[in-house]
């Protein structure tokens, strides 16, 4: 999984009779933090984020410049400025000015009365903020799990931002059916996140699809047939081996174009041209978002149905803050007030991983059925994917705009694993041939209804609220956090002083 290196450096006292005594202890602190970060920031694929330690304690202007330039040469895109003892605050500037003005900065200190690192932190970080630098501050001990998790969350948020910054969204076909909340809004997106968009007509997908190797297409079809058995419901009309193979061809075509064009994540318009004249996008979108296909394990490739660009960006950010987990795309379909839960479903790209959250596709596909596409909506045919997401803690989010100003709605929640009959009853209220998430949110119905920006919600397994908060605050996106978490949030100074 793509990521960007994290630099970590220690600022100290300029007086030689002080730093000659404290440097060894200070370097031990820096190296200990690096060890904690390398151990605690493992990705879903087993890789770790790259932590780069400045090899000298900053004790003067020339050392500050040297260490800043060293971390720049190592490609560091975010910086942790450590404080363990009192430091000379002006040394922050010759260090941080080696980087661009928008580099994420975390000021990290102990809470020790004898060696007042937090005094140095507030003096130095306060100087940076006076000049308009957005910074975050964490004060706590290295061995505290709470402090460690807070630092992990900041790094995940910062790294998601610095990774997506130079990425390209591959937009197949343009926004679907005039859904303007799914449009790629160029200027506010580039200003806040840096990523850009390249649009490709769906006709090119069809041209590539027809050129895909027949043996590879057959291999994919047989893989599905082997996994699903009689849960692959061929009907001789809408879902046949031939219409399923068209879906496989679209997946292979998207994969090929993504690699040729350098797309980092993508969206498929589908409706109406593709779904009425070639095939339904549900299967290719699902497999794109999965951590496997018939050729084995792979990195999930975010693909948003209906080419919803702000859904795709949200999913890409969720992928990065979670260390590479598959992400979910859902219609905000039905609220059940008697249960205070939502049924979120759509004919689209629920990653099959969410059926059991297993990296063995056979385990997930035990719960999955392929149904014939609904002819009323999808005249070209193909398979609709049906399953109910397994129970788990979740984070739900969505990027939106208010008067061209970006914000992100974020809330904790969970996917509920309901009893079988209850699950079927609820699924039948919408469409039982589509994938469902029975979502219990930590925010109220009214809070969600009044503040959520679109008809599509995104999600990822686990609690990623704090990481998303950090990401938003670093980028200047306003986080709107639902429930009790939102009430506890202290808006950063750059939101409060206008």
Image: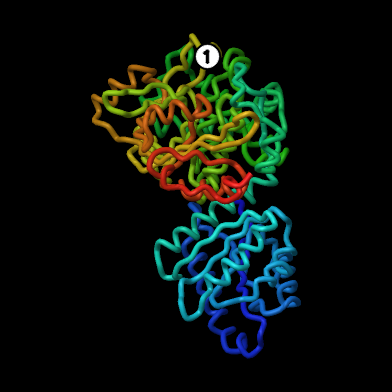
200 left or right of 351 in image: right
* Above or below, 408 relative to 491: above
Rendering quarter of residue 311: top right
321 left or right of 362 in image: right
Residue 113 is situated, as x and y percent measured from the top left of the image, at 46, 77
- The residue lying at 48 percent from left, 65 percent from top is 139
Residue 43 is situated, as x and y percent measured from the top left of the image, at 50, 54
- The residue lying at 55 percent from left, 48 percent from top is 320
Q: Can residue 10 be seen in this view?
A: yes
* Above or below, 295 relative to 456: below
In this view, the residue in front, 306 or 130, is 130
The residue singled out by tag 1 in the image is 378
In this view, the residue in front, 15 or 330, is 15
Total marks in image: 1
- The residue lying at 52 percent from left, 65 percent from top is 38
Residue 406 is situated, as x and y percent measured from the top left of the image, at 61, 36
In this view, the residue in front, 160 or 248, is 160
Residue 29 is situated, as x and y percent measured from the top left of the image, at 52, 76
- The residue lying at 54 percent from left, 66 percent from top is 108
Q: Is residue 250 visible?
A: no
Q: How crowded is mark 1: few (under 14 residues within 10 Å), some or many (20 or more)?
A: many
Instruction: Identify the secondary structure beneath mark 1.
Output: loop
Quarter of the picture holding the C terminus: top right
The colour scheme of the drawn protein is rainbow
The residue at the far front in this view is 497
107 left or right of 463 in image: right
In this view, the residue in front, 241 or 455, is 455
């Amino acid at each position: 999984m793509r990521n960007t290196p994290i630099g970590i450096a220690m600022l100290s006292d300029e007086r030689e009779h002080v730093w000659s005594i404290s440097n060894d202890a200070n370097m031990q602190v820096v190296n200990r933090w690096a060890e904690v970060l390398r151990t605690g920031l493992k990705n879903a694929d087993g890789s770790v984020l790259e932590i780069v330690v400045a090899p000298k304690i900053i004790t003067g202007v020339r050392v500050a410049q040297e260490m800043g330039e060293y971390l720049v040469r190592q490609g560091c895109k975010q910086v942790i400025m450590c404080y363990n003892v009192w430091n000379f605050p002006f040394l922050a500037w010759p260090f941080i000015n080696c980087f661009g003005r928008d580099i994420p900065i975390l000021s990290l200190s102990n809470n020790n009365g004898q060696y007042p690192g937090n005094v140095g932190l507030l003096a130095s970080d306060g100087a940076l903020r006076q000049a308009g630098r957005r910074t975050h501050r964490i004060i706590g001990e290295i061995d505290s799990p709470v402090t460690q998790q807070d630092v992990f969350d900041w790094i995940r948020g910062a790294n998601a931002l610095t990774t997506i910054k130079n990425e390209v969204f591959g937009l197949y076909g343009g926004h679907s059916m005039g859904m303007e909340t799914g449009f790629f809004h160029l200027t506010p997106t580039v200003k806040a996140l840096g990523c850009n968009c390249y649009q490709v007509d769906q006709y090119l997908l069809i041209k590539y699809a027809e050129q895909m190797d027949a043996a590879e297409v057959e291999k994919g079809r047989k893989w599905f047939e082997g996994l699903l058995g009689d849960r692959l419901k061929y009907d001789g009309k809408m879902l046949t081996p031939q219409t399923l193979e068209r879906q496989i061809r679209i997946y292979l075509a998207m994969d090929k174009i993504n690699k040729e064009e350098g797309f980092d994540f993508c969206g498929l318009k589908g409706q109406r041209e593709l779904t009425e004249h070639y095939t339904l996008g549900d299967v290719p979108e699902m497999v794109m978002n999965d951590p496997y296909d018939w050729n084995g394990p792979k990195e999930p490739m975010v693909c948003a149905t209906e080419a919803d660009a702000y859904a795709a960006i949200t999913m890409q950010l969720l992928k990065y803050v979670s260390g590479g987990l598959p992400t979910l795309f859902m219609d905000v379909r039905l609220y059940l007030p008697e249960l205070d839960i939502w049924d979120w479903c759509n004919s689209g790209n629920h990653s099959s991983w969410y059926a059991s959250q297993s990296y063995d596709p056979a385990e997930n596909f035990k719960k999955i059925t392929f149904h014939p596409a609904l002819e009323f909506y999808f005249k070209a045919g193909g398979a609709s994917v049906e399953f109910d997401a397994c129970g788990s803690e979740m984070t739900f989010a969505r990027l939106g705009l208010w008067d061209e100003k970006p914000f992100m709605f974020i809330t904790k929640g969970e996917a509920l694993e309901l009893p079988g009959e209850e699950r079927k009853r609820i699924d039948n209220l919408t469409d039982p041939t589509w994938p469902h998430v029975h979502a219990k949110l930590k925010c109220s119905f009214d809070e969600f209804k009044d503040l959520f920006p679109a008809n599509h919600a995104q999600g990822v397994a686990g609690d990623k609220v704090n990481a998303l908060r950090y990401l938003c605050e670093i980028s200047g996106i306003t986080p709107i956090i639902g429930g009790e978490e939102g009430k506890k949030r202290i808006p950063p100074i750059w939101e409060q002083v206008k």
